[in-house]
Image (cartoon, rainbow, N blue to C red):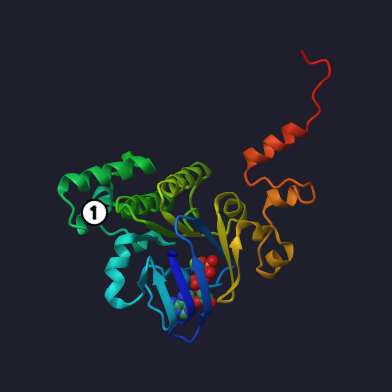
Amino acid sequence: MNAVDITGLKYNYADGTEALNDINLKIERNKKTAILGSNGSGKTTLIYHLNGIFLPQQGQVTVMGFPLLKKNISKIRQQVGLLFDNPDNQLFSTTVFNDIAFGPRNLKLGEEEVLSRTFKAIQMVNIEGLKDKPPYNLSLGQKKKVAIAGLLAMEPEMLVCDEPFSGLDPYSTCQMVDILNDLSIKGATLILSTHDVNLAYTWADQVIIMKEGEILAAGEVELLTDRELMIQGYLEVPMLADIFEGTGFSPRSPEEAAGIIRSCMPVGKNKN
Ligand SMILES: Nc1ncnc2c1ncn2[C@@H]1O[C@H](COP(=O)(O)OP(=O)(O)OP(=O)(O)O)[C@@H](O)[C@H]1O
Ligand SMILES: [Mg+2]
């Protein structure tokens, strides 16, 4: 069973903007999928259809086996966590701790389990120092971390993140990538939107490229090395693919690239 099956999805906003037009898409379970596309291409609108913020106006969406209908939304939300682009949309408690505990409490878990999940999530995201603060006083990056901790505490089978790295410093971005990879190793399905083609190339198994409310291409991450396609999607070829083009090597991470470069260096003859 796929994590997501979409056929013929259309979505128009109230002012008549055609945000999604005939989307047909399958997203596999237990994979890491990156959605790319220029501003206004429809990424957020599509993501809102993955846990029932929006219901299909036309077409069908199935998430984790459940048709996206009003009656299935709570079942879908128990399995699918959504990180909003703007964390202010999901933080509302008086303290960071209570915000993170809100989800598990809402699942009617015992208080011991709620506390254990909350502390674990706080530790994973490394925000122990923020736990007693009101979320609205935090910086953008800190709010994002609190929002992701709240989702982690729900232990979702599928996590959908709208631009999770925007506003994060480089160290926190690495930390976020590690958290997502850890969830992936544990079997979660991960879907994120990003403008960072380099990060998507290193991180993703699958990519979806959107343009003007349509899917321009979807498939293996190697799609990002197709220069014509990238130009069509107003994107850029990832730097590593650009540097190694025509060499027969296709490293997907700086570490892999460094290993290739070292292996190609002549070894000094007089080296002891
Ligand atoms: N509330 C709204 N009312 C009317 N039009 C909207 C609304 N929200 C989004 N749109 C329009 O829908 C289209 C798709 O927007 P969407 O936010 O899904 O794009 P996006 O790919 O997420 O862009 P970005 O990279 O800037 O986040 C755009 O043309 C946008 O202007
Ligand atoms: Mg968006």
**In the image, 127: left or right of 25?**
left
- On-image quarter of the C terminus: top right
Residue extending furthest toward the top = 272
- On the question of residue 227 being in view, the answer is yes
Looking at the image, is 251 positioned above or below residue 232?
above
- Residue that appears at 30% across and 54% down: 154
Q: Nearer the viewer, residue 21 or 167?
A: 21
Check disc 1 and give the amino acid type: Pro
Residue 249 higher or lower than 2, as above or below: above
Q: Residue at x 41, y 68 (%)?
A: 50
Task: Describe the element under mark 1 as helix, strand or loop.
Answer: helix
Residue drawn at point x = 50 percent, y = 83 percent? 17
Depth check: 77 or 17 in front?
A: 77
Point 55% across, 54% down: residue: 204
Q: Residue furthest front?
A: 1
Task: Read off the residue under disc 1.
Answer: 104
Query: In the image shown, does 136 or 23 lie closer to the viewer?
Result: 23
The percent position of residue 28, horizontal first and vertical second, equals 48, 61
Q: Quadrant of the N terminus?
A: bottom left
- Can residue 132 be seen by looking at this rendering? no
Q: Position of residue 67 (x, y in %)?
A: 36, 74
Measured as percent of width and height from the top left, residue 241 is found at 70, 51
Extreme residue in the bottom direction? 16
Indicate the position of residue 112 as horizontal and vertical percent values.
17, 44
Question: Is 65 on the left or on the right of 177, as rendered?
Answer: left
10 Å neighbourhood of mark 1: few (<14), some, or many (≥20)? Answer: many
